[in-house]
């Protein structure tokens, strides 16, 4: 789109004498001839040095037996690291745990976020300020959520434990129980991020032209029918985007797990990043960790691609 | 009966009166156009009839029932929106069937009705498309089809043709008029386009600043504008509105001082009542002149400033004593900038407006 | 039905419903803010109570500002829980300054480099422009740990580990991806006709950029900087591995205080969170229209 309009502008420019001066100057100056590449070079260099190059290095390392803590030179082992990784049952367990937490948390986020968006769609007194309060969890840091949800889950003086105690009589040891720990992680993450889904759904809801609702009123549609024929089609693409974005983000969940459960009890909440953290910075099996990192990288690339594809499609629809 | 009656209808947004005391009646089978510049309150009036806007004061009557407190759904009306308001995720067929669901008709009946409308509006070939894949004219027809598919008490159109190009607009004007003439419903069309109003309406209500200035037939609005606003708003090129002074009236002849000249012309006897006040405005349409060769008491002279050829006719801008005069001549009349012209007002083409801007005429 | 409202407007009934939901959602945040004003004893004295007593004790206490004083003025205040091999030295005033400095500098660097790049990507697309943008976004979507494994080695080798330049460079890259996407979305909303008109009038490219484009995206730059600051301030992972005692930022410092069962000074932690949360809430309120773009890294405008 921009490419086309830009070349069109330049094409038009050469037709006119006024623009020829500009074109001549462009031809004359090195800077103005290469403005595109020059503008983006500093950013690309920075990203190359801090991200791309390390990733390439890491790709190389994934074929070596290498431990950061040892003085030995890296030893080329071919695909051994990948083979070992695939054979290791604990990585599959980690991926399962991650999938479970992603499904639970993102599912909960979608449901809560959707209903909150419906609640906050119309204009009503105090909407802006209440919206700000609802959005607050999203603006907290993972560390804050981790630290304080750990406290809230504390059997002796935790808000949530106390709440559960009302129903079951005894204070629960949420984080001591494998199921409780998983639910605890899901709950904290869903609380933090359902406002995000709400924000996206709200964007879809406000993009519905008002006259469609008016037309459906005149056409005497029931609220149910109105929702499915008018509202939902406008929200659908954003729901999908929210789902993908949150899936990517929850897939990399680490901070709250690291703080609240450290992957425990046992391996109940050992998500893939937590697992990788252990392999790379506690066991220092650097070569193997690089191999795992590349699997994660691959998954994220696929999801990000899908996400951007949906973003583009939505932009074209509009 | 299917008629619409607005009684002292008023809408205020805070301090601002969008519509003030509108009194309009639309009979069954009649098409009324609300015509006026943007912001004149015509759309607000339509939306109050539809029930999309609450009424501040006054009443809306539809089919003999006061409907102020009824929701749009309860009013049983059909409306065509300016942006068509087609449901983007539904096909043309589903869009056309949409209003019928509330009537709990059997599917076969719905299909029959939709097919009939599709036939009338030549939409059969696009029934399975979604609105995003329709041409502008097709969208417009679907919007009309969705309105006529059921049996409402009245039809409301909000700027129905504003998004079409000129050729399509002309075609749709005829088509809508034809469709409406077969239905015995009261219809209100909002438009800012006077050609649209003049061609489609049985009667026109001209609005300005929330006030209904005049309600009359298209011919009446054009031939007998009630005041300076209507006179200036209707007709292209715009009517000449010349500041003048009434010097004398006697026996159906008025003598005016205008454009630094004296002009003696036959006028409505009611002008006689103005003797004494003096200041008036003379309204003559650019086509209300004829060129004359010789000077006379009933002629005006001016010097040609600009010429705009319009094909069969030529629009001449002439100036005299600081006042502009627009005159339309047949294209065969030779004209050139800088040359003097001399014109006579054709019989019945002179309108006299008093100081308040109201047209002076005997009842 | 006498009082019908226009579509899209709800009344006080909706306010009440929304207020209830907002209260439930905000309660944990409110409790954190309350903790910030409580002495250590108040927080820990609430064990073994019923929920009612518990909530009452959270909201009824003698407010104190000692937690905030500790953040800013007192170093070495926390020892690790009993049983820890050595006392953990903490110096929150220093960490606070570190966080401010590191986040501030990296955000400004990223904003300068990123705005230029965003302008380039938006206005003078290269061959493979979309691919570049995709790669840039991917670097942001990756879990930090994927990059950290080789970075860790790189920093060990170059001696950048635990030093300010290292973490600042890393955060600059971290913010850069976000900044490029955000700023590109702002530049794309400008009409290129204005720039072309300026070129026709003989403006140099530098002039077009500084006098025509930048002034139009000022608000966008501010929003980008604010969201960048929030992201950087909250970043834990890189900081955990790549800062030392001297360069440590707030998030890893907070995590380190979570020693034993009751070892953490929750009042102090709450004060830190509150200090940052209040400006963030103000930002949320002021930048409500840019919020969506901010939290989706500029991929969704509206």
Image (cartoon, coloured by chain):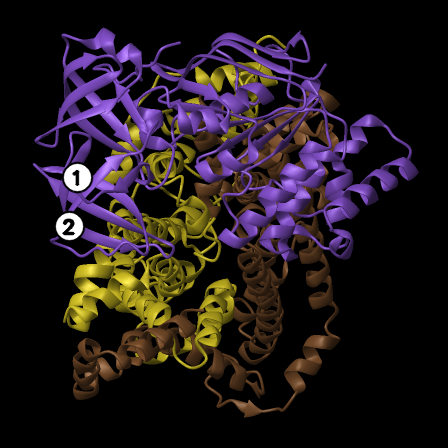
Give coordinates of residue B26: x percent, y percent.
59, 18
Whether residue C149 is situated above or below residue B361 in the rendered picture: below
* Label 1 chain ID: B
If the image is split into quadrants, where does the N terminus of chain A sit? bottom left
Give coordinates of residue A158: x percent, y percent.
56, 29
The reply, left or right, for residue C215 in relation to residue C86 is left
Give coordinates of residue C81: x percent, y percent.
45, 42
What residue would you read off at disc 2? Answer: B305
What color is chain C drawn in?
A: yellow
Whether residue C49 is visible here, answered yes or no, is no
Q: Residue at x 58, y 52 (%)?
A: B136
What color is chain B drawn in?
A: purple
Camera-nearest residue between C62 and A101: A101
What residue would you read off at disc 1? Answer: B324
Camera-nearest residue between B61 and A47: B61
What color is chain A drawn in?
A: brown
| CB under 8 Å between discs 1 and 2 | yes
Whether residue B5 is situated above or below residue B41 in the rendered picture: above
């Amino acid at each position: 789109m921009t490419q086309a309009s830009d070349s069109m502008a330049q094409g038009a420019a050469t037709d006119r004498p006024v623009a020829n001066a500009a074109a001549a100057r462009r031809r004359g100056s090195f800077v103005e001839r290469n403005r595109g590449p020059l503008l983006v070079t500093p950013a690309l260099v920075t990203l190359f040095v801090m991200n791309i190059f390390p990733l390439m290095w890491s790709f190389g390392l994934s074929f070596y037996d290498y431990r950061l803590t040892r003085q030995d030179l890296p030893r080329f082992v071919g695909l051994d690291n990948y083979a070992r990784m695939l054979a290791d049952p604990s990585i599959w367990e980690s991926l399962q745990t991650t999938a479970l937490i992603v499904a639970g948390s993102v599912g909960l986020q979608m449901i809560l976020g959707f209903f909150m968006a419906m609640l906050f769609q119309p204009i009503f007194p105090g909407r802006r300020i209440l919206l700000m309060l609802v959005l607050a969890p999203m603006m907290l840091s993972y560390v804050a959520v981790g630290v304080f949800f750990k406290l809230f889950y504390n059997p002796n003086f935790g808000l949530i434990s106390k709440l559960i105690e009302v129903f079951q009589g005894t204070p629960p040891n949420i984080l001591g129980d494998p199921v409780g720990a998983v639910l605890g992680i899901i709950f904290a993450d869903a609380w933090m991020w359902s406002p995000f889904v709400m924000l996206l759904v709200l964007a879809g809801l406000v993009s519905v032209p008002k006259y469609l609702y008016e037309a459906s009123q005149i056409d005497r549609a029931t609220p149910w029918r109105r929702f499915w024929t008018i509202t939902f089609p406008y929200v659908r693409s954003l729901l999908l985007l929210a789902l993908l974005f949150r899936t990517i983000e929850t897939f990399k969940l680490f901070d709250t797990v690291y703080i609240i459960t450290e992957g425990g009890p046992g391996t109940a909440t050992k998500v893939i990043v937590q697992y990788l953290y252990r392999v790379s910075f506690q066991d220092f099996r650097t070569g193997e960790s690089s191999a795992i990192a590349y699997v994660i990288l691959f998954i994220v690339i696929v999801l990000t691609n899908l996400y951007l594809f949906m973003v583009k499609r939505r932009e074209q629809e509009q | 009966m299917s008629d619409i009656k607005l009684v002292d209808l008023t809408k205020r947004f805070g301090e601002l009166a969008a519509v003030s005391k509108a009194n309009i009646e639309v009979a069954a089978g009649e098409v009324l156009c609300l015509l006026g510049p943007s912001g004149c309150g015509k759309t607000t009036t339509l939306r109050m009839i539809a029930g999309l806007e609450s009424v501040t004061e006054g009443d809306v009557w539809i089919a003999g029932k006061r409907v102020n407190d009824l929701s749009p759904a309860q009013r049983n009306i059909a409306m065509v929106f300016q942006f068509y308001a087609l449901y983007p995720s539904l096909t043309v067929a589903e869009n056309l069937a949409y209003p019928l669901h509330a009537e709990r008709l059997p599917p076969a009946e719905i299909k029959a009705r939709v097919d009939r409308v599709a036939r009338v509006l030549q939409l059969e070939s696009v029934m399975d498309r979604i609105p995003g894949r329709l041409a502008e004219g097709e969208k417009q027809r679907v919007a009309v089809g969705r309105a006529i598919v059921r049996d409402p008490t009245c039809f409301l159109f909000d700027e129905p043709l504003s998004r079409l190009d000129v050729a399509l607009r002309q075609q749709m004007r005829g088509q809508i008029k034809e469709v409406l003439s077969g239905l015995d419903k009261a219809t209100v069309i909002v438009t800012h386009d006077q050609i649209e109003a003049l061609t489609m309406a049985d009667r026109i209500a001209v609005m300005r600043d929330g006030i209904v200035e005049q309600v009359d037939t298209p011919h009446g609005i054009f031939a007998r504008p009630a005041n300076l606003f209507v006179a200036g708003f209707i007709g292209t090129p715009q009517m000449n509105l010349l500041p003048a002074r009434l010097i004398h009236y006697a026996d159906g002849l008025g003598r005016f001082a205008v454009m630094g000249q004296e002009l003696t012309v036959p006028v409505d006897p009611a002008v006689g009542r103005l003797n004494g006040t003096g200041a008036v405005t003379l309204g003559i349409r650019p086509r209300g002149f004829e060129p004359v060769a010789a000077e006379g008491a009933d002629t005006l002279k001016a010097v040609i400033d600009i010429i705009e050829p319009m094909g069969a006719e030529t629009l001449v801008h002439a100036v005299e004593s600081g006042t502009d005069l627009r005159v339309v001549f047949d294209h065969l009349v030779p004209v050139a900038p800088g040359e003097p012209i001399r014109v006579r007002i054709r019989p019945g083409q002179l309108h006299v407006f008093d100081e308040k801007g109201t047209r002076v005429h005997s009842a | 039905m006498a009082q019908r409202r226009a579509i899209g407007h709800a009344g006080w009934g909706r306010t009440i419903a929304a207020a209830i939901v907002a209260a439930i959602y905000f309660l944990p945040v409110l409790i954190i803010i309350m903790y910030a004003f409580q002495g250590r004893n108040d927080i820990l004295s609430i064990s073994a109570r019923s929920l009612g007593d518990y909530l009452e004790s959270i909201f009824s206490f003698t407010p104190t500002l000692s937690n905030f004083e500790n953040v800013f003025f007192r170093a070495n205040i926390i020892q690790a829980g009993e049983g820890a091999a050595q006392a953990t030295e903490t110096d929150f005033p220093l960490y606070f300054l570190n966080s401010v400095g590191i986040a501030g500098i990296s955000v400004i660097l990223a904003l300068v480099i990123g705005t230029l790049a965003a302008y380039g990507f938006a206005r003078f697309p290269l061959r493979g422009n979309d691919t570049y943008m995709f790669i840039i976004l991917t670097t942001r979507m990756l879990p930090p740990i994927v990059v950290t494994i080789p970075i860790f080695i790189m920093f060990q080798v170059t001696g950048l580990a635990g030093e300010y330049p290292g973490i600042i460079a890393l955060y600059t890259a971290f913010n850069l991806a976000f900044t490029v996407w955000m700023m590109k979305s702002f530049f794309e909303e400008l009409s290129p006709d204005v720039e072309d008109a300026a070129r026709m009038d003989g403006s140099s490219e530098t002039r077009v950029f500084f006098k025509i484009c930048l002034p139009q995206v000022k608000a966008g730059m501010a929003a980008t900087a604010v969201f960048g600051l929030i992201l950087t301030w909250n970043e834990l992972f890189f900081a955990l591995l790549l800062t030392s005692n001297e360069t440590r930022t707030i998030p890893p410092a907070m995590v380190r205080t979570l020693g034993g069962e009751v070892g953490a000074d929750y009042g102090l932690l709450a004060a830190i969170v509150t200090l940052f949360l209040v400006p963030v809430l103000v930002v949320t309120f002021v930048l409500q229209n840019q919020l969506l773009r901010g939290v989706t890294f500029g991929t969704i405008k509206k």
